[in-house]
Image (cartoon, rainbow, N blue to C red):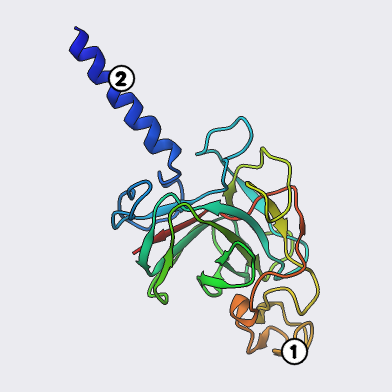
Amino acid sequence: MRPLLSGLILVLLASVAQARSGQSPSSGSLTGGAGGVDGACVGGKVTLRDDLGGSGMSSNAVTAIVVSATAGRYRCSTVRMPCTASGYTKMSFSVEVGLAASVGEVGIFDITGVTRIASTGPRSEVAAGAVDATGLASFTLTGGTQYIACHASSAAVTVSILSTNTGNVALNNSIVNSAFLGGSLATQVAPFNEACTAGSTPYTCCTGLGTGTCLGMADRTGVSGIAASPTAGPLIVIGP
């Protein structure tokens, strides 16, 4: 009886450790298994969550967030990698409420918000469900390192995406479990063609109503004009 009880305790401890690693995927359709904690990710998908998972809530708890009223504005939170992901080329996020003609994008930045490490590029947010981006430029995220995960959309207010839970009060971008918004000026937001209303309006890359040469997050070097936010950034799934 005692050996059996000991075995059950070990299994329970292992399950708890895996749940707390932040790697048990809860969103996205990328395939693969969890990676190794405190080492290299073992070739599978990794779910990037906020650092603490929310005050008094499970690290797996998620909620839909509504995009900022300013089209292209970044909504972000810090995440800490549970393992080192090398040579990853896939990213996924989930739309909860879509909108006709809307596009959106998620991206991962260094903790300063200056360097964009990887992003999906503009993707349709018309329908609810997982949004997959494959064949991206290979990127590496280091275990134990903090990054910033952001979402931006061409829509205003009416699109929502799957997010980490919002149990914590928003802090600033240098504090664990922070959540914040990027600036709302035309030179600070991620520009999308779908948000254009006329030539050069609201972005210089616009050529007319709904048309232009705008590239989303790729048009910006990083996240700027950071302000506190009561809701967190996107839940992102990455894969090799």
Look at the image and tell me in which quarter the C terminus lies: bottom left
Q: To which residue does mark 2 refer?
A: 9
Q: Residues within 10 Å of mark 2 (few under 14, many from 20)?
A: few
List x then y, in percent, for residue 189: 72, 73
In the drawing, what numbered circle is on residue 204?
1
> Residue 5, position in %: x, y?
25, 13
**Where 226 falls versus 78 (above or below)?**
below
Along the viewing direction, whichever of 188 and 153 lies nearer the viewer: 188
The answer to which of 151 and 96 lies nearer the viewer is: 151
Front position among marks 1 and 2: 2
Q: Sequence-wise, which precedes: disc 1 or disc 2?
A: 2
In the image, 68 versus 137, the foreground residue is 137
* 55 to the left or right of 157: left
- Residue shown at the point (79%, 85%) measured from the top left: 201
The image quarter in which residue 86 lies: bottom left
Q: Secondary structure at mark 2?
A: helix
Where residue 22 sits in the image (x, y, percent)?
45, 44
Residue lying at 68% horizontally and 78% vertically, measured from the top left? 191
Neighbour tally class for label 1: few under 14, some 14-19, many 20 plus, Cα within 10 Å = some
